[in-house]
Image: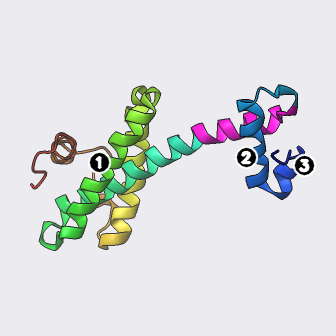
Amino acid sequence: MREIASPTSYETDFALWAESQAAALREGRFDDVDVPNLAEEIDALARRDRRELRSRLTVLAVHLLKLIYQPERASGSWRATIVEQVRNVRELLEESPSLVPSLPAFTEGAYRDARREAAAETGLPIATFPETPSPAFERAGARAFTGEDFEL
């Protein structure tokens, strides 16, 4: 028989608590479910997916900006990062399609963050990077997502 974790084990042994909660749900022992903490963890999962999407979009945007504004320094590593981030964004959206309608808002926030990061990484003034995505940026992003050559 599996050890039953008390609600206090949420604070002291998260792994034991999580395993215990999963077992209680699978076995229909609903009185053993720590509802408040379980609800908190489920909310945290949703927030995690949103943070991950924005983070991946930011990394993608940083590398696209670097590619556009410092093409002479473009490397295979930059291109590989773009391909990897596109793949990860696609996978995340496939696993959580409810995030798709929020994609424009995530992209807007990610672009704002990416401008600052690209300026820091390239040494170029932040004013170098348009406040909103340029047509070249949008074309490169669209090409990356369709699997086309995203070179400029």
- The amino acid sitting under disc 1 is Val
Characterize the magenta stretch by its predominant secondary structure. helix
Tell me which residue sits at (32%, 52%) in the image: 85
Res 8 label: 3
Q: Position of residue 46 (x, y in %)?
A: 58, 37
Q: CA distance from mark 3 to mark 2?
A: 14 Å
Q: CA distance from mark 2 to mark 1?
A: 33 Å
Q: Position of residue 26 (x, y in %)?
A: 70, 31
Of the 4 image quadrants, the one containing the N terminus is top right
Res 19 label: 2
What is the magenta range?
Answer: 32-46
Tell me which residue sits at (29%, 69%) in the image: 124
Q: How would you rate the neighbour count of disc 3 (Cα within 10 Å): few for under 14, some for 14-19, many for 20 or more? A: few
Res 38 label: none
Tell me which residue sits at (28%, 61%) in the image: 81
Give the mark, 2 or 1, whose residue is nearer the N terminus.
2
Q: CA distance from mark 1 to mark 3?
A: 41 Å
Numbered circles on residues, count: 3
Residue 93: tell me if it is visible.
yes
Q: Position of residue 69 (x, y in %)?
A: 19, 62
Q: Find out whether residue 33 is within the magenta segment.
A: yes
Residue 147 versus residue 38: which sits nearer the camera? 38
Residue 150 versus residue 89: which sits nearer the camera? 89
- The amino acid sitting under disc 2 is Glu
Is 137 on the left-hand or right-hand side of 47? Answer: left
Q: Which residue is mark 1?
A: 86
Of the 4 image quadrants, the one containing the C terminus is bottom left
Residue 131 versus residue 80: which sits nearer the camera? 80
Which marked residue is nearer to the observer: mark 2 or mark 1?
A: 2
Q: Is mark 3 in CB contact (under 8 Å) with mark 2?
A: no
